[in-house]
Amino acid sequence: MNMTIAPWKYHVFLSFRGEDTRKGFTDHLNATLKQRGIITFLDDKLNKGEVISDQLLLAIDESLISLVILSESYASSRWCLDELQRILESKKSLGREVIPIFYKVDPSDVRYQRGTFGCALQKHGDRFAENKDKVQRWKDALKEVANISGYDSRDRNEGKLIEEIVADVWSKLQPKLSYCFSNELVGIESKIEQVNSLLKIGLDDGRRRFLGIWGMGGIGKTTLAREIFERICGDFDMSCFLANVKEKSETKQGLVYLQRRLLSKLKIRDLEVDDTYEGRNLIRNLLCNKKLLLVLDNVSEISQLENLSIKQAWLGCGSRVIVTTRNLQVLIAHGEFEIYEAELLNDNESLQLLCKRAFKRNKPKEDYVKLCKSFIHYAAGLPLTLKVLGSYLCGKNELEWKVALEKIKKFPPADVLKRLRVSYDALGEVEKKIFLDIACFFKGMVKDQVTQIFEISELYPQLAIRELVEKCLIIEYYSDHGTWCLGMHDILQEMGTTIVLEESPHDPSRRSRLWSLKDIDRVMTKNKGSDVLEVIHLQSSTPYDSNWDPEVFTMICNLRILIIACDLHLPHGLKCLPSSLKILEWKSYPLNYLPSGGNLDQLGVLKMHHSKIEQLWKRTHILEKLKLIDLSYSEEFRTTPDFSMLPNLEQLVLEGCIKLVEVHPSLAQHKKLLVLDFKDCKNLKALPTRMEMDSLNKLILSGCLKIKKLPEFGKNMSNLLVLDMKNCKKLVCLPSSICNLKSLKILNILGCSKFSSLPENLNENNCLEELDLSETAIREIPSSTIGLQNLKLLYLRGCKGLSSRSNSLVRSLLSSVQQVFGLHNESPTSSMYLSFISSMASLKELNLEYCNLKAGSIPNEIRCLTTLEYLSLARNDFGNASTGNWALPPSLKCLKISNCNLNDGSIPNDLNSLSALETLSIGGNNFTHVPAGCISNLLHLRNLHLSHCPWLKFLPDLPPNLQRIDTVACHSLQTLSYPELLLKCMAFSNVSVESIPPHMHTNNNRAGIWWTLGGEIPSWFHNQDFKVLDKIESRDVVQVDSDSIVSVEVDVADFRGSSGSWGISLCVVVQDVNLDDDVFDLYLWMTHKASEEEFVKKDLRWRVVFRGDSHQILTMYLPSSNFAVDCIKVEFIFYTTKTMCGEAELDMKADSGDHGKFIISKCGWRVTRKEDVEEWLRTIQKCSSTSDNNEILSEESVHGKRYREGEEDLQEEVTVSETHSARQSKLKRFS
């Protein structure tokens, strides 16, 4: 809104002739204006002894609107004429509004000074004969005001006239007041637009609409509601803003007081309200025909709405009700409210609000920019915190700002915590426990895992977590790892930790929760535990030699959770654990046994990864509440307990326990176990001969190298869903009793190289959906398998001995499957399998690798597979094919035609018809170029794999939405790859590059990324300094085990605002130290900095495969459009993690040393302009004709090492994902 409002004190100045209208019209008008909340000025407010004319002139200037009541004797008063003259001067100089009211006079008499106005001016002329200019100014003023559109009172009802005038005044005031108030607010306009849209403001359809503004304390709910109220209240018959309903309802008379307050605010007086029932009826009867605007601020309970008769049927047509609350359940329970979730301020809005309070302006002082950013980071968008901090910092010098910054990190602002704590204090005891646990320990953790912890603690978490979400104390968000997590605002977390610290400021043993190593060590070393302590959570990245008292836990008799996530040494041992313990998680537990002292009857979870434990208990005792035992990678563990003593155990995870040889026979009869995981127990020889485990739904034996046969399955094992025996190298067959597994959905026998036959009765497993027989010695598929009507995934890869007698059976099986893998040329019947394709109506994925296909032998039936999304034709020979239509189905999302001996004349010409294609793998072929237009129109194509095309000279025209291109070992292209690819990437930033087709100038917010072989950084990346880090210092990055972490800082201050195209080019060498064929994830955490402070963050990830090579090079270009506008520095943190198979877990399971170690050995970077790359390109072209080009690119980085055959498909596993941090994007849900 482009306006400037001069300072004001009054809404309306009333100019009138007292003897004409004071006791009648003017008083009535003034009273009605006041009733509407409009501030008026009347000259009877002047104190005696004051110079009236001067005070009047000042009041005129300080009024937004002047009402000039032109009555019969108005012009006879020189005071009135002086007022009028000043009013019109203010209109011109200050932009004030003027509304004339012609009270029982003809407007033309005023305009032309006739009648009483003419007589009065004649008298003034005679009196001021020597000052004719003064009289003329009065005449001009009367003429001017008469020409302004106003109100004529003649022949009109006075009451209706006053209503019209007041409505007009309000309509003129509203934008002025909104501007005046909103000019002091920050980020309010967009929020008002959203709320007005939900309320359908301006839509006069007679419908009543209710809106709830929901959000955490201090987020600005009341401010938003007040601003909306001020803007629209003039459009309603009655309006009321009832502030702080929660507080008022807690007074002596409570809800009755609220009812009286509402009636009083609506000017409905002289009515006695004795009880809530009477009050409800009064409100309902009095308001049912009124168009009402009602704002109820800070509602905390549904009863408050009910007793104020807030129902749509009980209010007049067109009414609007706005409720602000921290409790979502209030709005849900009422059932008639639209819900608007209040939002935090962004960084720019936060900066503006802080500066308004601290500097009384919108921008920081030059020397305070860095400090302002620090305070903004601390406040994390919460307006309350910014206001409190800004007011506190106002007038303080730079040193005091720095001291204040350090102080708030230890002692959060008391005013903020006091406001926020209201929500905490209103919680029940269970909800308080859960809130404090999340604040102190579990923020950012997976919701399901936290829920399990609270369930074991008997805290009813489903209800409690929902209540905490509804009261804005925690949030649920969807993480980058595909799991729902629990989070909360940083200030709320500090409030939680402060509440705990305040329990006993000086004696940590008297606190309910401990997390500081210093405090924990103090309590445990001096044996000062107490019965107050409930949770100990110790986390450290470095080994720690403790001096703990071995009997320390005898004093901590109410400890319910003990989590130790560090390499802690106990030289004095441990004699007991608390009998109250419900959760025991101890990574790298240093002792061989659990302590014999103490009774663990309450224990529900026992998790000890990488421990040295050999046996859990030396003596037998019943633990009825224990539900989970997880001893993964406890390599010394040898002896399992008597499971009859653990009657309610639900999960037993012994993954990687390599010294485990046998299990206790009682395991076979356990009735409650759901998950049994013996993965990679390499020395486990056998399970009990027969299993009668009624509840078991997952049995994992993969990697158990010495198991020869499975136990018999009892008739009651009908709940087993997954049976995984991958790589059980000595397994020969399945028991016939597998038919008792009536619910079995997944059967995995992959890699069981001695497995030769399926049981004849497998058809009785009619729920089976996935069957993996890859790399087994199976010869025949039994005829009974035809009954597997629900089979969707069938894997037969590497089944070289499968006989031709199985053809018809395979064809029947294929009729319902959605994925097929394994039609290889090693099988004598592979050509016959191809004829089965027409029967695969549900097929989604088809792998025809190694099928000895040639030009013209691709089955035409493939095009009829309308559901097919994945097709691999890799490693067939289409070298003699002429360019033509390959009959590819248009539904394809991924197509692999790599290593097919394709040349320039054999690339299929119907690639451009695959409009849904997202990934195209065409590497390992012999073409020199990809035909023009072949892929450029594939709008959904994200990934293009061109690796190992030794004759490829030119890159194809690229589609506009491509995210990555793989050119590993394209040797003819390599000498130009770096600059050429950089130029192509820069073309995506709307830069006109002559050699790049115009259609590439589209998306301007992307990264160009490619991989090559080699171990040297090209010298063109002239900055090759980087830091090696031990850990990532950021609360937004989950701390994980990493082989290598490096940091690079790039100063871009000189490029900010540059008119030309620029970006940052990065080059990273990743080394496989152990030279193992393995997979790892390379992450990039990118932080944009404005004045040294964190501003915007992005997280990118690549999955990389090593196959027989020690080094790979990642090169990437990031255009400037990826960075914050005021960015002066960008920090890049690269780190590697071992790729985990299976479901994502919170605890990253470290491997047992059998896999590769991946380090980032070199880094290079350069701030890049288009002309820099073009110069590089010219230099390379010049040097390539006269030298080996070693000065530009090292020999190894140009040529690399040849990958052995078969590696290309793993290179295609490289993925790129780009997401904003939790802080910028939080997805929430409600249970």
Image: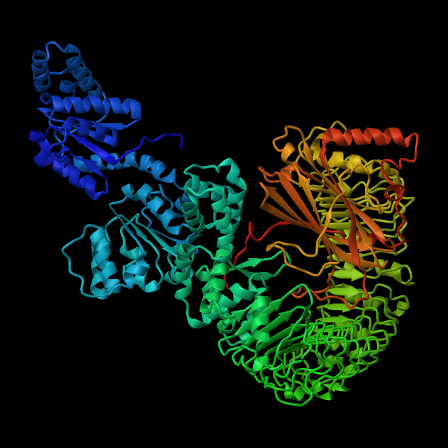
The x, y position of residue 356, in whole percent, is 42, 40
The reply to whether residue 923 is in sight is: no
- How many numbered marks does the figure carry? 0
- Asked if residue 238 is positioned above or below residue 647 in the image, the reply reads above
Q: Horizontal and vertical percent for residue 601?
A: 58, 85
Q: Is residue 912 above or below residue 641?
A: above
Q: Would residue 964 be found to the left or right of residue 70 on screen?
A: right
Question: Hey, which residue is sitting farthest bottom in the picture?
Answer: 620
Q: How is the image coloured?
A: rainbow
- Which residue corresponds to the image point at 31% horizontal and 60% vertical from the top-left? 247
Residue 737: image location, x then y, percent: 76, 83
Q: Which residue is at the front of the view, 668 or 1104? A: 1104
Position of 288 relative to 593 (above/below): above
Is residue 1079 something that shows in the picture?
yes
Q: Residue 474: percent from the left, percent from the top?
A: 49, 61
Q: For residue 360, what is the image quadrant?
A: top left
Q: Is residue 732 left or right of residue 180?
A: right
The image quarter in which residue 526 lies: bottom right
Query: Is 247 drawn above or below residue 125 in the view shown?
Result: below
Give the position of the N terminus as an image quadrant. Answer: top left
Question: 1094 or 269, which is in the foreground?
Answer: 1094
User: Going 59% across and 64% down the picture, which residue do you hit?
Assistant: 446
